[in-house]
Image (cartoon, rainbow, N blue to C red):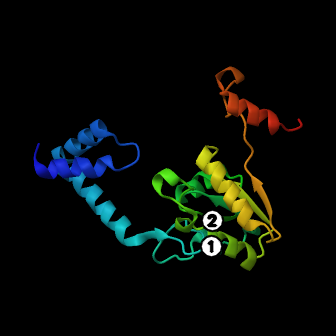
Amino acid sequence: MLAPIDELEKALARLPGFGRRSSARAALALVREPGRLLEPLAAALDVARRRVRCCSRCGGFTTVDRDPCDTCTDETRDGTILCVVEEPADIASIEASGAFRGRYHSLGGKLSPARHMGPERLRLAEMADRVVREGISEVVLALSTDMEGDATAGYAAEMLKGTGARVTRLAFGLPADSGVAYSDPLTLKRAMANRTSQ
């Protein structure tokens, strides 16, 4: 294989969802049709590199000319509730649901000793500072339900003790359009513990 194609494959393989075979297919498709695929992708990547950044307040995605971002400056949002997420992309997912109208704070990851992600690499201190400075009354921890997410949630809750803010966590339970027979024991245990009245 030619070295430039090899380098392209390696670069694509670093992206989430791209394995060795899918990055090889994508690289070959890009070089096969440079006018239709490669050049527009290179231009879009260049614009994203120059214009997209993380909001200085919430850590979500914004552009260089909109910092703080539109969500942080939207006066119609409830400024007393802060939803804490792991990654900026999580903000977009929650926004798409239409279920939350407060403010956001992205930690930039979760605690993970295996990936050398300690508390100092996350935006935890900024979160605690915002809660006090902005007079947040409730912090919703919208973090993963895996071991690392649970550890991050516990660490964040401990940091927020004494701030006066109520700390809540997203409810755990069965996913939509799923049945009891298809759920794992931990999901069923959490669903039973977090059951609600009808």
As helix, strand or loop, the secondary structure at mark 2 comes to strand
Q: Which of the 4 image quadrants contains residue 133? A: bottom right
Measuring from the top left, give residue 143's x and y in whole percent: 64, 52
Q: Residue at x 77, y 55 (%)?
A: 168
Dot 1 amino acid type: Glu
Q: Are marks 1 and 2 in contact (CB under 8 Å)?
A: yes
Q: Which of the 4 image quadrants contains residue 87? A: bottom right
Dot 2 amino acid type: His
Mark 1, residue position: 126
- The answer to whether residue 161 is above or below residue 23 is below
Measuring from the top left, give residue 79's x and y in whole percent: 74, 71
Can you say which quadrant of the picture contains the N terminus?
top left
Q: Is residue 37 visible in this depiction of the protein?
A: no
Of circles 1 and 2, the one toward us is: 1
User: Is residue 45 found left or right of 88 in the rendered image?
Assistant: left
Dot 1 surroundings within 10 Å: few (below 14), some, or many (20 or more)? some
The numbered disc on residue 105 is 2
Dot 2 surroundings within 10 Å: few (below 14), some, or many (20 or more)? many
